[in-house]
Amino acid sequence: MKIQLINPNTTGAMTDKMAAAARQVVSAGTQILAVQSCTGPASIESAVDEALALPGLLAQIGVGEASGVDAHVIACFGDPGLRAARETATAPVIGIAEAAMQLASLVSARFSVVTTLARTVPTAQRLLHDYGMTARCVRVRATGVAVLELEAQAGESVRKKIAAECRLALAEDGVGAIVLGCAGMTDLCGELTQELGVPVIDGVTAAVKLAEALVALRLRTSKRGDYARPDIKPYAGLMARFAPGA
Ligand code: 2AL
């Protein structure tokens, strides 16, 4: 099967890092096609970043659908454009935040999220609410680490900040698991799991394994109800090429 792993920011080093992590966990015979947006912000940390990342993301969903991929993963912890991607796609579309939260809730009654900048905390909280996960998450903790500090391999001081925040979550929040709140943390999951002795869930690997499960079960995105295709109409200006039916 072919899984399209989409980094919705435009940072190639982060795409490579996610692709390496995904390839370590998928079954033999699963191909990871890792791409990033061709247009948009270098990292997604604000509502403006998110809004302007969506055309590039939706363009990649369109490319993947046209080439017949079996599933798409949106690899940014804000799950940007997830509902729009599901309206567009017939293949399943998995967001890394939803995947990580769902898997965490299967191995621990409650978890905390350890994320990047404080300004991304409300986004994670909104997603927890939307996914019905608020009661399972004790706290969303910011580390003050910017996404671009996680672009390639994180330096020692960044790793220490993230590990320290995870240890605080275990000491103060009473949780049994940690969810990593950025796709760029994917390469830290193994060492944090060893160091902390609890399940540490990275959304990139969680999402690709869920995508494999959906494909194996032949479950595709429903085209009835909330994810029905958008109605055909013209879009003006820069967005004209994104118009449904264009
Ligand atoms: C992210 C992420 O995973 N990728 C990105 O650009 N921003 N998440 C975050 N919490 O800032």
Image (cartoon, helix red, strand yellow):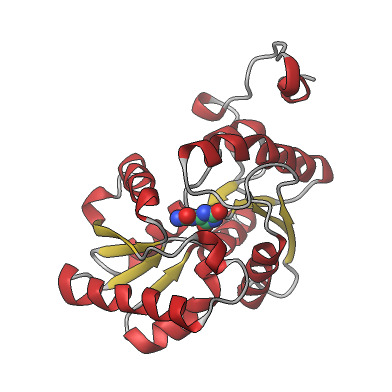
- Quadrant location of the C terminus? top right
Residue plotted at (28% across, 65% down): 111
* Residue at (69% x, 11% y) in the render: 233
**What residue is drawn where x is 74% and y is 55%?**
35
Q: Position of residue 138 (x, y in %)?
A: 21, 59
Using the rendered view, name the quadrant where residue 57 is placed: top right
* Image quadrant assignment for residue 113: bottom left
Q: Position of residue 185 (x, y in %)?
A: 50, 69
Q: Is residue 174 visible from the viewing direction of this image?
A: yes
For residue 238, above or below residue 140: above
| Among the 4 quarters of the image, the one containing residue 3 | bottom right
Residue 67 in the figure: left or right of residue 44: right
Q: Does 230 sit above or below residue 227?
A: above
Q: Is residue 46 left or right of residue 119?
A: right
Considering depth in this image, is 104 or 161 the residue closer to the camera? 161
Number of marks in the rendered image: 0
Residue 166 position, x and y percent, is 31, 74
- Residue sitting nearer the eye, 213 or 192: 192
Residue at the right extreme, as displayed: 67
Residue 1 visible, this angle: no
In the rendered image, the quadrant that contains the N terminus is bottom right
28 or 5: which is nearer to us? 5
Q: Left or right: where does residue 201 sit relative to residue 57?
A: left
State the image coordinates of residue 144 (x, y, percent, origin top left). Answer: 38, 63
